[in-house]
Amino acid sequence: MEPASNIGGDLFDAFFVRSHQLFFCIGDVSGHGIASALFMARTIGLLRILAMSTVQPDELLTKLNDRLCIGNETNIFVTLFCGFLDVPTGALVYSNGGHCAPILRSDGYSDYVPIPKGPLIGAFEDMRFGAMHLTLNPGDTLFCYTDGVTEAQTAAGEEFSEERCLSILDRVGHIQLPEVLDTFRGEVSLFTQSEVLADDCTMLALRRPTTIVST
């Protein structure tokens, strides 16, 4: 995560809710400044509590939305993608609230992950969210990002685009995950010809290991 200013609004988190089950999320809070940063911190705090009480991401987002709507006079909202991954089997159940579709690289080919339609979180009360399932095969890489990556622009206004993300993940999706993320950040800088970001830039990558070591 790299903020565009001293105070960022993007978020991500990943932690085990059970010995074999990983919760992860990535999100983008509207606006900039202290109000958005406080909303982001509140969102992360609620996510960490809610993820320990349910394994259904759609239920989690429904509860998160209801709580974030309380006292939200500034009308700030957050887009969010989240999921629960069963590490031994690769079974992933996920939900989405207005966020960018992740990219899955499997068998050397990258494509967007189908996502359930879901409203912006914190904007309207009594919203409901859907959930979808997929299985990560050994070696599969899931790449999540915020629109600060795909909407990074050149001086002429051309955007980095989702298509470039697909192409890059096709090319480097097999290497170590920190190097994958470094490659993306370098490609964004090379494309924009600037180290200065116009928007927060956040990326999260997961890969199912080819072997599971029992402990």
Image (cartoon, rainbow, N blue to C red):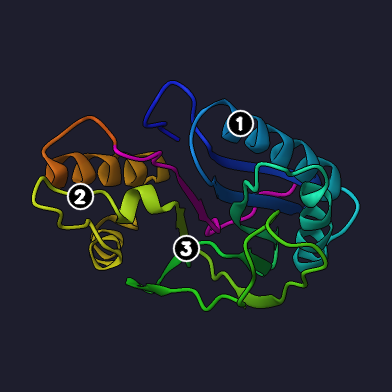
Q: Using the numbered discs, state the Cα–Cα distance from disc 1 to disc 2 in whole angstroms.
A: 26 Å
Q: Amino acid at mark 3?
A: Cys
Which residue does the image show at 33% across and 71% down from the upper left? Answer: 108
Which residue does the image show at 27% across and 55% down from the upper left? Answer: 172
Image coordinates for residue 54, horizontal then vertical, percent: 87, 58
Q: Amino acid at mark 2?
A: Gln
Tell me the SS state at disc 1. Answer: helix
Q: Is residue 8 left or right of residue 5?
A: right
Looking at the rendering, in which quadrant would you find the C terminus?
A: top right
Mark 1 sits on what residue? 35
Mark 1 nearby-residue class (10 Å; few <14, some 14–19, many ≥20): some
Confirm whether the magenta stretch covers residue 154: no
Q: Using the numbered discs, state the Cα–Cα distance from disc 2 to disc 3 in whole angstroms.
A: 17 Å
Image coordinates for residue 124, horizontal then vertical, percent: 73, 62
Which of pointers 3 and 1 lies earlier in the amino acid sequence?
Answer: 1
Mark 3 sits on what residue? 100
Q: Which residues are magenta?
A: 198-215
Image coordinates for residue 115, horizontal then vertical, percent: 56, 75
The secondary structure that dominates the magenta segment is loop
Tell me the SS state at disc 3. Answer: loop
The correct choice, above or below, for 118 with respect to 198 in the image is: below
Which of pointers 1 and 2 lies earlier in the amino acid sequence?
Answer: 1
Q: Is residue 79 left or right of residue 95?
A: left
Between residue 75 and residue 37, name the one nearer to us: 75
Q: Using the numbered discs, state the Cα–Cα distance from disc 3 to disc 1 in whole angstroms.
A: 23 Å
Confirm whether the magenta stretch covers residue 200: yes
Query: Residue 153 — which label?
Result: 2
Which residue does the image show at 29% across and 38% down from the upper left? Answer: 198
Tell me the SS state at disc 2. Answer: loop
